[in-house]
Image (spheres, rainbow, N blue to C red):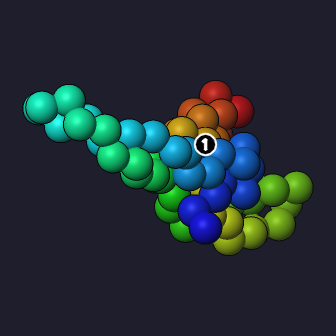
Amino acid sequence: MAMCELCGVHRRAGKNVSHSNRHTNRWFFPNIQRATLTIRGKRKRMHICTRCLRTYQNRLKIA
């Protein structure tokens, strides 16, 4: 299952809506990437969403 190890975001249920307004069930998946992060001085490989990845990179620039 696609899930971010930092924020816990995972797949969501929704509907496809066609031009004729028919609704069919579908899943919305987060954009999960594999990244190596330095947490408390140790490098750890994690599956994180791109929103967390952007936040993490911005915090590195500020620090």
From where the camera sits, is residue 27 visible?
yes
Which residue is more in the foreground, 2 or 22? 22
In what element is the residue under mark 1?
helix
From where the camera sits, is residue 53 visible?
no
Is 53 placed left or right of 21 in the picture? right
Q: Which residue of the protein is positioned furthest toward the left in this rendering?
A: 19
Dot 1: within a 10 Å radius of its alpha carbon, few (fewer than 14), some, or many (20 or more) residues? some
Q: Identify residue type, mark 1.
A: Cys
Q: Residue at x 74, y 69 (%)?
A: 44
Q: Residue at x 72, y 44 (%)?
A: 7
Q: Quadrant of the C terminus?
A: top right
Residue at image mark 1? 52
Q: Where is residue 25 in the image (x, y as percent from the top left)?
A: 40, 48
Q: Residue at x 12, y 32 (%)?
A: 20
Q: Position of residue 56 (x, y in %)?
A: 63, 42
Q: Which residue is drawn at 67% across and 66% down?
A: 46
Q: In this view, does 46 lie above or below 14?
A: below
